[in-house]
Image (cartoon, rainbow, N blue to C red):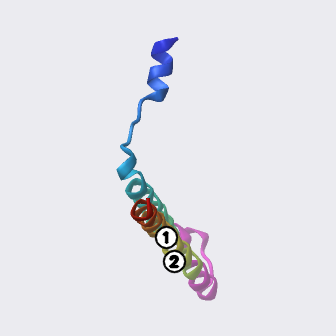
Amino acid sequence: MSRVRALFATTVVPERSTPRLIRGVLTGIGVFTFLFGVFGLQFLAPTRVEMVLALLLLATFAVASAALGQLVVIADHLERRGG
């Protein structure tokens, strides 16, 4: 049982790099979502207006996702500076 407990207690990612990992994951999710929309939307055969609106929505999501990742890193830097 102690081996199982040690397995779950072991840190996989160092604490200092966790915000950067979160930033990378959120940026990747945003980029993947936008690219999936660009390449996958044509198979749904939307009108031009629908396609432009969908791409604007996907671009907004991608930018918001990347910005959220940046905010996580900034919050971590400010927390370390204050502590």
Q: Residues within 10 Å of mark 1 (few under 14, many from 20)?
A: many
The structure residue drawn at horizontal position 39% and vertical position 37%, both measured from the top left corner, is 12
Q: Quadrant of the C terminus?
A: bottom left
Q: Quadrant of residue 7?
A: top left
- Label 2 SS: helix
In three-dimensional space, the C-alpha distance between marks 1 and 2, rounded to whole angstroms, equals 6 Å
Question: Which amino acid, mark 1?
Answer: Phe
Question: Going 62% across and 88% down the picture, which residue do you hit?
Answer: 49
Q: Examine the residues drawn in magenta and state their main secondary structure.
A: helix
Is 81 magenta? The answer is no
Part of the protein shown in magenta:
39-54
Q: Position of residue 5 (x, y in %)?
A: 50, 20
Identity, as a three-letter code, of the amino acid under mark 2: Ala
Say which residue appears at 61% left-offset and 84% top-offset.
53
The numbered disc on residue 34 is: 1
Pick out the residue farthest to the top: 1
The answer to which image quadrant residue 76 occupies is bottom left
x and y percent of residue 20 in the render? Answer: 38, 58
Marks 1 & 2, CB-CB < 8 Å contact: yes
Determine whether 63 is above or below 19 in the image.
below
Question: Which residue, given by chain and number where applicable, does mark 2 sit on?
Answer: 59
Q: Quadrant of residue 10?
A: top left
